[in-house]
Amino acid sequence: MKTPRPDTAGVIAPPPVLLAGALAVGFGLQAVIPISFVSDGRMLICLVGATLIAAGAALSAAVVRAFRAAKTPVSPGRPTTRMVSTGPYRYSRNPDYLGQMLVYIGATLVANTWWPMFLAPFVLVAIQRGVVQREERYLEAKFGREYRQYTDRIRRWL
């Protein structure tokens, strides 16, 4: 007898885990082979980084509020009970991942290292293929026409 597939998108890992892993690898590489953005003027780069972290955290907090209002879990590892198209989802189908990427870039600037930036394209491909595409298939299968109409109106990223 075939085991029923769980009611989830089956993502490879939550994006915060993928991003945190890349940051850890990048910071580790920085400790061994330092490649900094700047040697002078660190205050400005830290200020820009902190601003990006704050903006990304605010965007992710707005996502959590939209999911709570819709009474559906934020985690891609749990079944989605409702489609969310309010709050930041009025502008992007993946605002939480955008917010998390802003935090990632901000942390990279604050740490003054290029390494996480070199790793970013690989993380973005992993998120696109291992998370976003799987979530899109799951949501289309679960919500059908409602989800297709949403994707016709709202861009995937920006």
Image: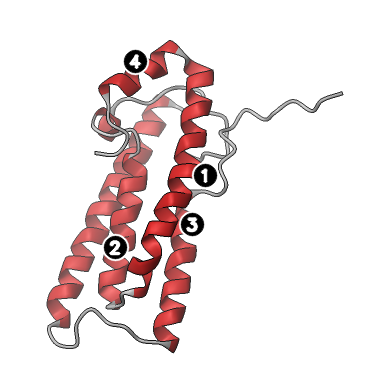
Q: Is residue 24 left or right of residue 79?
A: left
Amino acid type for the residue under numbered disc 1? Gly
Dot 2 falls on a residue whose secondary structure is helix
Asked if 93 appears above or below 119 in the picture, the reply is above
Q: Nearer the viewer, residue 106 or 134?
A: 134
Dot 4 falls on a residue whose secondary structure is helix
**CA–CA distance in space, label 2 to label 1:** 21 Å
Q: Is residue 87 left or right of residue 80?
A: left
Task: Provide residue 30's location: percent of width, then percent of height.
Answer: 39, 82
Amino acid type for the residue under numbered disc 3? Leu
Q: Which residue is mark 2?
A: 105
Dot 1 falls on a residue whose secondary structure is helix
**CA–CA distance in space, label 3 to label 2:** 14 Å
Sequence-first disc among 3 and 1: 3
Residue at the location (25% across, 28% down)?
90
Task: Provide residue 56's location: percent of width, then percent of height.
Answer: 27, 53
Does the CB distance between marks 3 and 1 fall below 8 Å? yes
Residue at the location (41% across, 77% down)?
27
